[in-house]
Image (cartoon, rainbow, N blue to C red):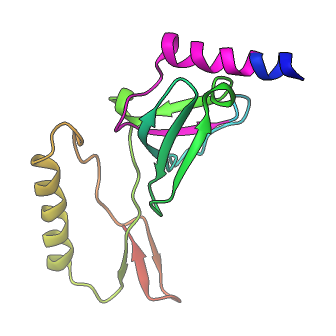
Amino acid sequence: MIGSASSKYFEGIVFILVRRPYDIGDIVHFSHPELDTDPNGSLGWIVQKVTLFETVGTWVPTLERASFNNGSLASSQIINWARSPNARINVQLHFPIETKYEQIEIFKRAIEEYMLVRPREWLQLNGFRVDRIYTEQSYMQV
């Protein structure tokens, strides 16, 4: 039992010192290495603190904080958004069917302006179009 715990402890130290898979402020996602990741992207953790023993992160959607044993993370698949310069994100927006084209154009321009002032975070807008119209629910998906 002590041998297994020592092994995980050592594995965690090597993981942080040698691999350095993330830095403070990076957004990361941890998953099992043999499972496929979601093709629509992965919500992640903002790395808050890294020690030789643990990594502390904040869950992006809810701002909950958690700590992870580095030894257990050493065998995980880690997706690091900060080190994925060509990663894409697909955001689906829902607008009421009655929304006028001009209103959607104003919204699109606001997104483009937001991205322009953050060139380190956003490279470009690849598309902005109606994907589906749900007449029974009275909304369209952009």
**Residue 109 magenta-highlighted:** no
User: Tag count in the figure?
Assistant: 0
- 56 vs 93: above or below: above
Nearest the viewer among 49 and 80 is 49
| Rendered location of residue 19, percent (x, y) | 51, 14
Image x and y of residue 84, in percent: 39, 29
Left or right relative to 91: residue 65? right
Residue furthest right in the image? 1
Residue that appears at 43% across and 27% down: 22
Based on the picture, tell me whether residue 29 belongs to the magenta stretch. Answer: yes
Q: Residue 85, image x and y in percent?
A: 32, 29
Tell me if 107 is positioned left or right of 10 in this view.
Answer: left
Q: Quadrant of residue 99?
A: bottom left
Q: Which residue does the image show at 68% across and 24% down from the upper left? A: 75
* Residue at point 40%, 36% (across, down): 81
Q: Residue at x 50, y 59 (%)?
A: 64
Q: Which residues are magenta?
A: 7-31
83 or 93, which lies in front? 83
Relative height, residue 43 to residue 21 (above, below): below
Q: Quadrant of residue 13?
A: top right
Can you name the residue that lies furthest to the front here? 2
Q: Percent x, y for residue 100? A: 21, 83
Task: Using the image, determine if residue 61 lies above or below residue 96.
Answer: above
Image quadrant holding the C terminus, namely bottom left
Can you say whether 35 is above or below 44 in the image? above
Q: Nearer the viewer, residue 32 or 88?
A: 32
Question: Is 124 in front, or is 17?
Answer: 17
Query: Relative to residue 48, is residue 112 drawn left or right?
Result: left
Quadrant where the N terminus sits is top right
